Amino acid sequence: MFSSAFKSFTSNITSNYEISKQPSANVGVWNIFEAKKRSTGTQVSVFVFDRKVLDVASTASFGAKTSSTSVRKAQDEVVDRLKKEASLLARLRHPSVLQLIEPVEETRNGGLMFATELVLASLSAALSQKDRGSTHARRNESNSKTIHNVDVDELEIQKGVLQIARGLEFLHDSAKLVHGNLTPDAIFINAKSDWKLSGLAFAGPPDNAEGHQTLPQLSLAEALHDDPRIPSSVQLNLDYSSPDFVIDSNVNYSADIYSLGMVLVACYREPHSSPFETHGNTSTYKRIMASPSLTPGPRNNFGCTNKLPNELENTLVRVLAKRPSDRMTAVEFQQSEYFDNILVNTMRFLDGLPAKTSAEKQQFMRGLARVMPQFPVSVLEKKILSVLLEEMKDKDLLSVILQNIFQIVKMVPGRREVLSTNVLPKLKEVFTAQAKSQERDTSKEAGLMVFLEHIKIISDNTSAQQFKEDALPIVHVAMQSTIHSLVDAALGTLATILPVLDFSTVKHDLFPVIANVFAKTSSLGIKTRGLEAIAVLCGANDETSAAGGDDLSGIASRGEEHKKNLSMLDKFTMQEKVMPLLKGIKTKEPAVMMTALKVFRQIAKAGDVDFLATELMPILWTFALGPLLDLSQFNAYMDVIQALTQKIQREQVKKLQELATVNRTVADSRERASVTSYTGQASNHVNGTGDEVNFEKLVLGSRTKEQKDLFGGALDDEQKLVQNPASYSWQTSSGRATPSQRMATLQPSQSQSRSVTPDVSASSFPSLQPTDSTSIWSQPLQPGPRPSVAAANSWTTPSTMQPIVPAQNMWNQPLKPQANMGASNMQATSYLSTPTTSNLYNATVRNTSSIPAPLLAPPPQSPPPINSWQHRGSSQQVSAIKPQPSKPAGLDKYQSLL
């Protein structure tokens, strides 16, 4: 209901603050919302009053018959009273009075709103929180969502009542006002656990006040009248009122002291409420006051069921006296024995700390650590810690304040939230602020030393991001200091803070600062500490640095795996950034040399073999031969050198072995690929497939497609006529031959001549020499009849090839007449058809080695006509070709042929 009302608000508060949608607490007719200022982020509480609450209360009391005029008048009086309350907060400025941030504003629907300091709950809500099981507790517990952050123990009560007494002192002595309605609803508890005075709707000057008064005097006749038309929360609460108001009709300062005593009794009673239950009836109040057994006093233990402390009883006797003259004043109440203990006096001193001298502050801060264990945790966390953080602006007290702050952090259970929310942001603000002068600030240096001493508790209770943003900049400030002791302490914290940081932060934020300190320092101690820090960054620790027998393999042992730092520097940074720093070391002091050995050992574990051999080994020998090293230190260097040598040898041998294995594998693969290629080529040559088919497809193109079957499938594959491809005497048989034809090609040649494929790989041809006179080709051609077509086709017909007779060399015989050649041819043909053909073929194959290489057959005088169609499987008998009378074939014929 109230969140939707903000839509109609157009005020300074709604435009400058981000207000939560749901109220965090309810006090009377006020709904309290948490808000944050957009410009600064300051948290405040916004009090909102909706006038509709008064309409609901009036309707519930009188129904529809209630006079609208009278109700409206009563509601206006309530609104005026609430405006007065907010206006007085703006006028009254005191640490014990609720601080007003934004003045009261009217809303469109007639409501009110104003902003104050952040409050958690009212005292009434906090007391109701303690009453588990009563109806009153269940009703009020749901009205505050932040009550669980409020503790009301005995020390909190003492501290809070003391603060309210200070507020009354200011109100009575300075403002000259009587509160008039001091109840638990008029007391608010802020985020620091301080009790704040509010609820000034009935405040006014006392009777017989002197001088001009800006506020009208309280009209008791109107205030004591119970008006059912308005809520009881906006009327005078008789349960906490003084008998001066109700019985004597007297307005004086002592009435507020009596009301404060009733509030104090309510804090100790169970349930936590007033001993009076008048329900707004003055007659009931008078009857109670007339009965000694009902009036709070020593006889009835002040209406409490449990035993009260003696100091409190003695104080309440004078606070709850019936006569105003017998009561304490606000100042006397603060000096009562109820507050006379070390804890309350400590709280009192803290409240007045800004007014104390520097010596008093120093003495107080040094003794505070001894009494802090006696304080409740809630007081330490909310009250004392907040005061100490505010006092950090005093640099003279910085170191002692930090010691107390870290002691409180160790004691509170929610230390993680306390550090991240309150402590670290304040520490960053103090230590990272730029100094106005270049003078040495010893107080800041002492505070930095305290901070470094407690870096462990900070790293254990903060996230990596929080530590990087708030704590690491403070460490950088300490490292860059000119004080050697401070730099040494900062470098010594590296092993503690390193596990919290990630790799990127270590490499880019932390390492450059350490490297700069190491490179620029002239102190031998800082040089050594810097090398130790670099060794830690590289992954070294006490165990690995002192361990012997390290093989520099980079493999952590089982016992140190959990100790290995996950944020150590990478190999590139070690080789390219750390090594130049080590090479730049000019001193030969043994302390520096031996600390550098720790870094060398870590680089040797992570570096490349080539880098170790060419870069690290030379500098190791240079350092090992330092003139100031003793025997044990030299042996330590030699252990690293020998281990590094073995590592280089081991890695190089492994590398060469792997390379030899790879080369052997590649050679075997190439050999297998060569054998496979040779086998495939031989198979393709035997089968007549492969490159020949691809070549024909390449040169013939689409003409290599199958011809259309002219017979419409009437003939089978053996009976079909296929086109005989063109062939020449110097060609081998066509690649389109059938398997049977290819097998026939492998048989012994039956022709008198055969073609030889020219050797294209030869760079030149040998000169031609005349053949032997006994050669048949050396004789002139004999005239004869023209050969037939069949005879012309015999050049390319395998069936006309005659087998070579091993008994005689037919190439050395003279050319026989045509008739004899024809007869011989016929005899050869008939001989092939006899059953002894295989015997003759075997004999021919066995004697092929004795046959000399034949010469090229002479080309025909004119190209013979070629029959384009040929029936497969036919063996036509063709007579031998008779030579035609022509001129002798000279060398020019052969040259033109070649």
Image (cartoon, rainbow, N blue to C red):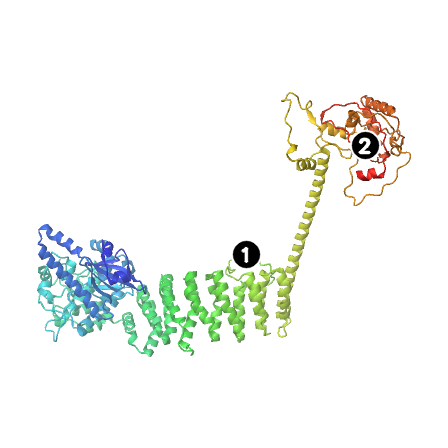
**Residue 440, located in which quarter of the rendered image?**
bottom left
Residue placed farthest to the right in the image? Answer: 773
Disc 1 to disc 2: CB gap under 8 Å: no
Q: In the rendered view, tell whether residue 491 sits above or below residue 646.
A: below
Q: Which mark is residue 475?
A: none
Q: Nearer the viewer, residue 534 or 247?
A: 534
* Along the viewing direction, whichever of 636 and 688 lies nearer the viewer: 688
Measured from the top left, where is residue 829 in percent x and y?
81, 23
Q: Looking at the image, can residue 547 be seen?
A: no
Residue at 53% from the left image edge and 57% from the top image edge = 561
The image shows a total of numbered marks equal to: 2
The residue nearer to you, when weighing 729 against 218, is 729
If you read the primary sequence from the N terminus, does the residue marked by circle 1 or circle 2 appear first? 1
Q: Is there any visible trace of residue 401 in the rendered image?
A: yes
Instruction: Say few, some or many: other residues with alpha carbon within 10 Å of mark 1 (under 14 / 14 to 19 / 20 or more).
Output: few
User: Circle 2: is it few (<14), some (14-19), or many (20+) Cα within 10 Å?
Assistant: few
Q: Is residue 889 left or right of residue 426?
A: right
Spatial CA distance of label 1 from label 2 is: 97 Å
Q: Which residue, given by chain and number where applicable, does mark 1 sit on?
A: 558
**Residue under circle 2?**
861
- Is 891 drawn above or below residue 710 in the view shown? below
Q: Residue at x 48, y 66 (%)?
A: 510
Identified by mark 2, the residue type is: Gln
- Residue 148, horizontal then vertical, whole percent: 29, 58
Report the amino acid beneath label 1: Arg
Q: Nearer the viewer, mark 1 or mark 2?
A: 2
In the image, is residue 357 above or below residue 704? below
Rendered-image quadrant of the C terminus: top right
Q: Horizontal and vertical percent for residue 257? A: 17, 69
Q: Secondary structure at mark 2?
A: loop
Q: Does residue 715 appear left or right of residue 157 in this picture? A: right
